[in-house]
Structures are given as structure tokens and as C-alpha cells.
Image: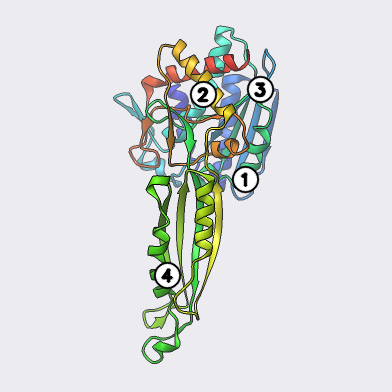
Amino acid sequence: MTEDLRALVGLETPSEDKELLDAGLSGIRRWLTRRLGEPAESHRHDGGEHGDVLEVLYAGEVPGEVLFLCHYDTVWPAGTLANWPFEVVDGKASGPGAFDMKSGIVQAVWSVRCARALGLPLPAVRFLLTGDEEVGSPAGRAHIERLSAGVRATLVLEASLDGAVKTGRKGVGLFDVVVHGVEAHAGLEPDAGASAIHELAMLIPEIAALGDKARGTTVNAGLISGGTARNVVAGQAWCALDVRVASVAEMRRVDAALARLRPSDPRARVTLRGEWNRPPMVPNPPSQRLFKLAHQVAAELGFALGEVSVGGASDANLVSALGRPVLDGLGGLGGGAHARHEHVLLEHLPRRTALLTNLLVALGT
């Protein structure tokens, strides 16, 4: 498993590099075939400017189907491997994408290998690998929503949080607040202008105040830009917002508040761009039953499986919003997602894989 992880990390797959994504997915497809043989079905869907989407189906011995949902893109730019190659030190495997989430892909494949080696009957298993999860799944979303319909469970191989699976995630809104002002010479005719920068500066405290810790809502202005020159009253300014909410009610509250934003100078105006990229993942009844089953499987293996709600979003949000059974955070243990200390604790890979194997068997009974 460690050598397979080394091989996958060695395939650079930055979300923004179509050429590397395509080459990386071809490499993953060849590896899948070496490990599990030729699938009963295989489809590679064009991702356009984003990474392609690969779905492969392996037939089962019992009725039903389980969907393994994985993404192969990473946040790391091309060339990262040159100064940060895969390595194992003191049981920690590090490298770009090792934790988020190539170790999860390895676990999923080895769970099927394990079941086969032990002669355990499985339902059909479909792997869905997307190449744009880190940028919001614009190409992958339709395939996720299509293929998660009618399956017994969607198992998402995002990394675990200290061993716990993720049954709740916040929804994410990505918005730009744009202020349109009136340009003028800052020295000769300052009163003839209406500064978009000044107006935006007054609006940002109002925007930040939409955060509500008690309700689990955060609002972050992560980027800001505007104006054309020091001596020009700015004609335009904008800020990019990252909004996280734990409920649909909070989505609606923030929507309404952003729509009410107004500049103090009547000559200026505000426009809003963007959307809710992912809805909140709130445990639905099918997912609650799925977690209960996974908890029982873990107990049979001799350990307690916890659950947790986190602020980050994933493709599991999309499945959960449709009322379908989904369990997230089934991947590796470690830490440092999206950071230079990203790593996987190798000692946990066998037990996490055993959990997946026995969960697949349980879903087929």
C-alpha cells in the first residue's frame, strides 16, 4: 500500500493543470487495472478545462452497488514534487496530495483486493474519480449526482479527522462584492468622484458582521482589489468572500443580507457575483443509518468509530443534499491538508482498509 501511495503521489495532478491532470488520470487508470483487473464498465468523461472524470465498475457477487467517491486533483502546483518528493520518515508518509486524498484512493482499491483475497462476497463497486474537487467540482458534480442515485451507499475517501468519520460539513458560498464608483482626478476634482474603494471599506465591517459563531457561520473577505492609480478616485473595487454555514436557514439569512448591501454615496452602486458552491451537509436519515452500520463494523474489528462535523466542504455535501446515504472521512489518518507538513500515518492504513472491506460486505447483505 505504501508503494502504491508513492506511485500516486508521484503523479502530479494540480487542479489548475489540465495536461498533468489528464496524464495523472491515465496513470491511475492503468494502476487500477493492475490491482483489480479490467472492470466490467469504464467511462472517461471530458472535464473540459478541468480534470476528466473516470468511472469504473467492478461487478459484485451479491445484489446492489456501492459508490467509492474520490478526487485525484490536489492543491499543489506543478513542480512541487521537485523539492518535496514522497518520503517516509518515522512512519509518516508525506508528499503533495498524500493525505488529501491519494491515500484514500489506495485504501478503496485495497479494500476490494482484501475482500477478494478472503473470498468475501461484495456488491458491485463503482469508483468515481473526479479531477476538480479542490476547485468546487464544476465538471464532476453532474456525475456525482447521477451515480449516487440508487446505490446502497456513497463512501467518500476524504481524510479522517483523528479516526472519526465526517457526518456533517458546512456549506460554502463563494461571492464577490463589487462596488462601482465614479472616477475623478483626486487633486483637481475630488468632489466630482465617488470612491469605490472608500465605499467598499465601509461595507466590509458590515459584511464581516454577518458571521455568527453561535450558528456556525463564518464570513471571510480573503481578497480585495480596486482602483487604477494613486491620484484617481477609484471607479471600481471588489472583495472576494468565503462564506461557511451549517444550515440552509443561514444560507438564506446571508443571501438576504448580501442583497441588501448599499453604498453610502448614492452615485455608487453595489453588485454581487457568485453562488453557493456546496450546500451544508446535515446528517439525513439514510446517512445516519449508514453511520450506525459503520460503527457496528468498527466495533467488530475492535475499535470505536467516532463521528464529527467539520467546517470544510467536500463532494459528500452534494450527495447528502439529495437525501442519499453518504459517509465521508473514510480515508487516512494524518494531518496537514493543504500544507507543507501534509502526511499520512502508515500504521493506520491496514485498519482503515479493513473497515472499508467489512463495510462493503455488510452493505451487500
Q: Secondary structure at mark 4?
A: helix
The mark nearer the N terminus, 4 or 2, is 4
Q: Which residue is mark 1?
A: 139
Mark 2 vs mark 3: which is more N-terminal?
A: 3
Residue at screen point 39% across, 35% down: 95
Asked if the residues shown at circle 1 and circle 3 are in contact, with their CB atoms under 8 angstroms apart, the answer is: no
Local crowd at mark 2 within 10 Å, few (<14), some, or many (≥20)?
many
Q: Nearer the viewer, mark 1 or mark 2?
A: 2
Coloration of the structure image = rainbow
Q: Are marks 1 and 2 in contact (CB under 8 Å)?
A: no
Q: What whole-number distance in Å separates the C-alpha atoms at marks 4 and 3?
A: 51 Å
Task: Pick whichever of labels 1 and 3 is earlier in the sequence.
Answer: 3
Distance (Cα) linking label 4 and label 2: 45 Å
Q: Which amino acid type is marked by label 3?
A: Glu
Which quadrant is the C terminus positioned in?
top right
Where does label 3 land, which residue? 65
Of the numbered discs 1 and 4, the one sitting upstream in the chain is: 1
> Which circle marks residue 291 in the picture?
2
Query: Which one is nearer the viewer's eye here, 364 or 136?
Result: 364
Left/right of residue 88 with respect to residue 68 in the rendered view: left
Q: Nearer the viewer, mark 4 or mark 3?
A: 4
- Residue closer to the observer: 270 or 3: 270
Position of the N terminus by quadrant:
top left
Counting the numbered discs, the total is: 4
Residue 149 appears at what percent x and percent y?
Answer: 68, 32
- Residue 328 at what x, y percent from top left? 50, 31
| Whether residue 247 is visible | yes
